[in-house]
Amino acid sequence: MKEIFEQYGGVLITVVAILSVIAVIIFVVGQGNNSVIGQAFIRIINSFVDNANHNAGINCKLM
């Protein structure tokens, strides 16, 4: 176990941190699409997808 933490400790901490951030976002957005924060995340994600699709030459909408 000690060898695993010595070898992969940084990676494990990074994965836990990323999963924690994702969990917080899901918790906040999961409160409802009508919430202010939920709508803000939806607009941010839609804007990102629209810009990525435009830059890639793809014409489709996520939501």
Image (spheres, rainbow, N blue to C red):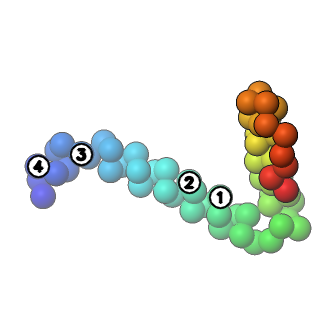
Alpha carbons under labels 2 and 3: distance apart: 20 Å
Q: Which mark identifies residue 25?
A: 1
- Residue 47 location in percent, x, y? 82, 41
- Residue under label 2, please give it: 21
Instruction: Tell me what residue is drawn at x 74 percent, y 30 percent.
Output: 56
Considering only order in the chain, which callout, 3 or 2, is on the residue closer to the N terminus?
Answer: 3
Which residue type carries mark 1? Answer: Ile
Q: Are marks 4 and 2 in contact (CB under 8 Å)?
A: no
Q: Which mark identifies residue 3?
A: 4
Q: Residue furthest bottom?
A: 31
Q: Are marks 2 and 1 in contact (CB under 8 Å)?
A: yes
Q: Quadrant of residue 37?
A: bottom right
Considering only order in the chain, which callout, 3 or 4, is on the residue closer to the N terminus?
Answer: 4
Q: Is residue 23 left or right of residue 34?
A: left
Alpha carbons under labels 4 and 2: distance apart: 27 Å
Which residue type carries mark 4? Answer: Glu
